[in-house]
């Protein structure tokens, strides 16, 4: 077979194996600029492409580079305003801020890779939606195109946010766009789906300004966030502002600031969370809301979290304005479990916090920053225990190996007392990972650690 025929045949097989859709037709409809890779991909094949395939998708060196959206100088950034499928035979590039506008729905198929240039972001405005449908075998990956960090993924909706009396909306100021407004009156607003998604090396805006790797603003209870890994975030890994929805199966690794921060009246659930902090990290959880009787406060249930800190991390949780139930979790290495801001303590006392069925290691002189809270919740009060959960060293070392484990050993994690609210899955153990060795760890297969 001559060279031309061989290249055409190989290209046909790769596209057919990767996807059932016709991505080129779809992408042309939304005005995507394409950069023809020419013979580069096939030359790499001829020479022996060394990139591994992802599930049924081709290796990276055989994917066509596609710059997403049409640049609009009048509004700044790129715009996508028609529905499309993003599939794994292409490598999608966010060249700066890219906005999904109108009723746009972008469906991202398993194994798809999206890369952002320095300071780039993918923003689904309040009427748009992202359906990122990865699998454990072929997760979706969002990352920087180069060593310069991209900004992150922003999902905006029309669920209520608590800004101040008479105010129902807010805006992502760092985007500096009116179309980055979110909030409203629809508690069931659907911002989309994130299933088996890895977000890597994000949360830096152009010029080094602070950002988040994943921002969820005004998202309602139809939003599905399940199996998300945020790795090496420059600033906060996940920011949630307002709305009400559940977040489950989250891994936060090697970030530099907070793990999950919420504000503006989020009423939600956070369950099955691994938060591996470093000496330069801040809190695993930053729980906030306006301390103002005229607005709705955040009210959040956190269950089955395993968080690894160090003596450089003053506390695992910073509570400021939000009501919080923290249960069935494991804390290792912190100087203190929870700190509450002074004004918060004066305003709410103990009515805003419930801490139960947690394992804390090592044994501390003061578990909380307030004597009243310490008397109420310090082990052995409220089912909390000061004991070693016997986590594997692969999950507690500051530098994670390629296959870390956070499965507790012994029997300490199986001595849970008392049920948690109906909003969380019932479990009979503490921590993010089931201690039963016959139950697979949900972090396996789709997460990557470097």
Image (cartoon, grey):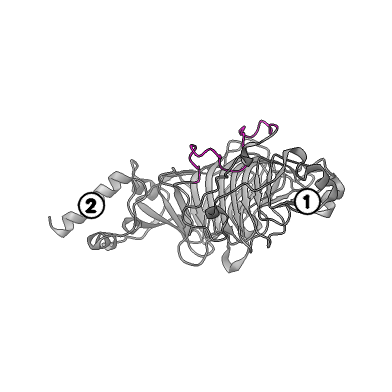
Q: Residue furthest left?
A: 1
For label 2, count other residues whose C-alpha is less than 10 Å away and answer few (under 14), some (14-19) or many (20+): few
Which region shows up in magenta?
418-443
Magenta-highlighted stretch: main secondary structure? loop
Determine the CA span between mark 1 and mark 2.
Answer: 62 Å
Which one is in front, 346 or 41? 346
Percent x, y of residue 158:
63, 42
Residue corresponding to mark 1: 368
Horizontal arrangement in the rendering, residue 230 relative to residue 294 (left or right): left
Q: Which mark is residue 10?
A: 2
Horizontal arrangement in the rendering, residue 75 relative to residue 184 (left or right): left
Percent x, y of residue 156:
60, 47
Which one is in front, 102 or 273? 273
- Can residue 158 be seen in the rendering of this structure? no
Q: Residue at x 68, y 47 (%)?
A: 387
Question: Quick check: is 441 in the magenta stretch?
Answer: yes
Which one is in front, 113 or 382? 382
Q: Residue furthest right?
A: 346
Among numbered discs 1 and 2, the one appearing first in the sequence: 2
Q: Which mark is residue 116?
A: none
Percent x, y of residue 334:
69, 56
Percent x, y of residue 396:
58, 55
- Which element is circle 2 on? helix
Question: Quick check: is 203 in the magenta stretch?
Answer: no
- Can residue 349 be seen in the rendering of this structure? yes
Instruction: Check the picture and name the quadrant holding the N terminus.
Output: bottom left
Q: Residue at x 72, y 55 (%)?
A: 315
């Amino acid at each position: 077979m001559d060279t031309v025929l061989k290249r055409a045949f190989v290209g046909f097989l790769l596209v057919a194996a990767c996807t059932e859709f016709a991505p080129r037709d779809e992408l042309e409809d939304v005005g995507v600029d394409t950069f023809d890779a020419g013979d580069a991909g096939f030359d790499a094949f001829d020479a022996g492409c060394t990139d591994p395939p992802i599930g049924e998708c081709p290796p990276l060196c055989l994917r066509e580079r596609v710059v997403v959206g049409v640049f609009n100088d009048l509004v700044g950034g790129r715009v996508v305003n028609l529905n499309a499928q993003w599939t794994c035979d292409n490598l999608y590039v966010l060249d700066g801020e890219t906005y999904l506008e109108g009723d746009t729905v972008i469906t991202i198929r398993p194994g798809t890779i999206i890369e952002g240039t320095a300071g780039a972001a993918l923003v689904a405005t309040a009427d748009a939606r992202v359906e990122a449908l990865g699998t454990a075998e072929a997760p979706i990956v969002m990352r920087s195109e180069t060593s310069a960090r991209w900004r992150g993924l922003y999902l905006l909706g029309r669920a209520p946010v608590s800004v101040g009396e008479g105010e129902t909306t807010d805006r992502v100021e760092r985007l500096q766009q009116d179309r980055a407004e979110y909030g409203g009156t629809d508690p069931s607003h659907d911002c989309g789906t994130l299933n088996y998604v890895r977000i890597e090396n994000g949360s830096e805006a152009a010029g080094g300004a602070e950002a988040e790797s994943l921002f969820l603003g005004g998202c309602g209870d139809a939003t599905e966030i399940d199996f998300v890994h945020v790795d090496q975030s420059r600033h906060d890994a996940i920011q949630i502002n307002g709305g009400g929805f559940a977040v489950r199966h989250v891994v936060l690794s090697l970030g530099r600031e907070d793990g999950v921060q919420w504000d503006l009246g989020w009423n939600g659930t956070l369950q099955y969370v691994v938060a591996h902090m470093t000496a330069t990290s801040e809190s695993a959880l930053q729980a906030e809301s306006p301390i103002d009787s005229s607005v709705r406060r955040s009210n959040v249930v956190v269950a089955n979290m395993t968080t690894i800190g160090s003596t450089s991390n003053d506390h695992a949780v910073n509570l400021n304005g939000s009501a919080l139930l923290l249960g069935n979790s494991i804390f290792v290495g912190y100087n203190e479990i929870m700190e509450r801001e002074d004004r918060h303590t004066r305003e709410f006392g103990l009515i805003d916090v419930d801490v139960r069925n947690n394992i804390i290691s090592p044994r501390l002189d003061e578990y909380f920053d307030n004597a009243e809270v310490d008397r109420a919740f310090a082990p052995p009060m409220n089912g909390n225990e000061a004991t070693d959960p016997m986590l594997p060293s692969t999950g507690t070392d500051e530098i994670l190996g390629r296959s870390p484990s956070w499965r507790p050993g012994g029997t300490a994690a199986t001595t849970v007392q008392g049920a948690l609210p109906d909003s969380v899955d019932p479990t009979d153990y503490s921590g993010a990972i089931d201690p039963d060795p016959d139950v697979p760890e949900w972090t396996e297969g789709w997460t990557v650690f470097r």
